[in-house]
Amino acid sequence: MMERQRNYIYPDKESLVGAFLCEVQKFLERVGEAGKPVNIAISGGSTPLALFEILADRTRSEDWSLVHIFWVDERCVPPEHPESNYGNASRALFEVLEIHNGQIHRVMGENDPAKETLRYANLLKKRLPSDRGFPVFDWIWLGLGSDGHTASIFPHQIELWNAESSCVLASHPDSGQKRISLSGGVINAAKRVSFLATGEEKSLVIKRILMKEENYLDYPAFYVNPGSDYLEWYLDQEAANLL
Ligand code: 6PG
């Protein structure tokens, strides 16, 4: 186990999401006390969605007043498409809490992918502080695919992790669906990075990544290594059962 990591294991997805909710509530409280805007980037997928639903229920609109929300990655589909990460987060959280659109900075999946990749990179450059050429997020929430992908950087395009740009245009290995994703440089420039991973199907890739076994070097998620050293894995028992 890499010494720099914090791994938190919970009996099930519900208790994991409940624990992460507490972390978010503490974060929001600190942000309120400091009184300065912060920038977070959120992922798509089913695990984050469960989190958005409990956040909608257990936090208030005013808690988020200083938080600017961006995306780790987005499918190149319009917001109303069921696979839109923004659309799903909006329906589960932003619309419920009526979080102001001025704080929501979505990737415009309906735009030309190459142009939108550039637009989003420029938006990040304009709005976020930077470190060694990469925009710095206060907190990034990541998911993990059973193939070791994170964000929308998949093993077959692992070279995108080391892109010099902050945003890359990727494609899903099976569907070919185009996706716009943060690159590894941005993820590793963040002050805090948290993985949320649940389910038996993730257990083997998690073991290989955390124990540096077998073909772990093939997995983009292995390269998440923030310079801040603030890296957390929130796992349920099923996902952690090979550790
Ligand atoms: C996406 C995500 C992706 C996701 C993982 C895990 O747009 O799909 O950003 O990285 O977080 O695939 O998804 P699940 O939590 O649904 O397994």
Image: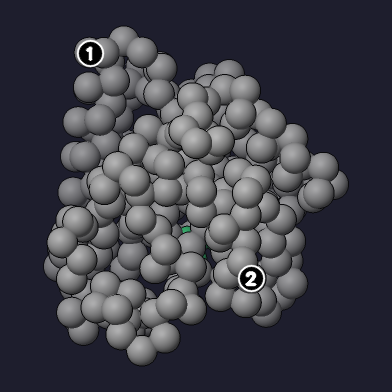
Residue 242 percent coordinates (x, y):
21, 84
Farthest-out residue, front: 132
Establish if 201 lies above or below 193. Answer: below
Residue 131 percent coordinates (x, y):
46, 33
Nearer to me, 226 or 89: 226
User: Between disc 2 and disc 1, whose residue precedes?
Assistant: 1
Residue 144 percent coordinates (x, y):
42, 66
Assess disc 1: are there few (<14), some (14-19) or many (≥20) residues with their C-alpha within 10 Å of its C-alpha: few
Name which quarter of the figure residue 14 lies in: bottom left
Nearer to me, 86 or 120: 120
Establish if 74 lies above or below 218. Answer: above
Within 8 Å of ligand 1, the CB of disc 2?
no
Establish if 9 lies above or below 63. Answer: below
Nearer to me, 215 or 201: 215
| Side of 161 relative to 232 (left or right) | right
Q: Amino acid at mark 2?
A: Gln
Identify the secondary structure beneath mark 1. Answer: helix
Name which quarter of the figure residue 178 lies in: bottom right
Assess disc 2: are there few (<14), some (14-19) or many (≥20) residues with their C-alpha within 10 Å of its C-alpha: some
From the image, which quarter does the C terminus lie in? bottom left
Q: Residue at x 71, y 75 (%)?
A: 175
Res. 33 mark = 1
Compute the Cα span from label 2 to label 1.
41 Å
Residue 128 percent coordinates (x, y):
52, 26
Identify the secondary structure beneath mark 2. Answer: helix
Q: Residue at x 21, y 57 (%)?
A: 5
Which residue bears the numbered disc 2?
A: 157
Q: Residue at x 62, y 36 (%)?
A: 106
| Side of 238 relative to 68 (left or right) | left
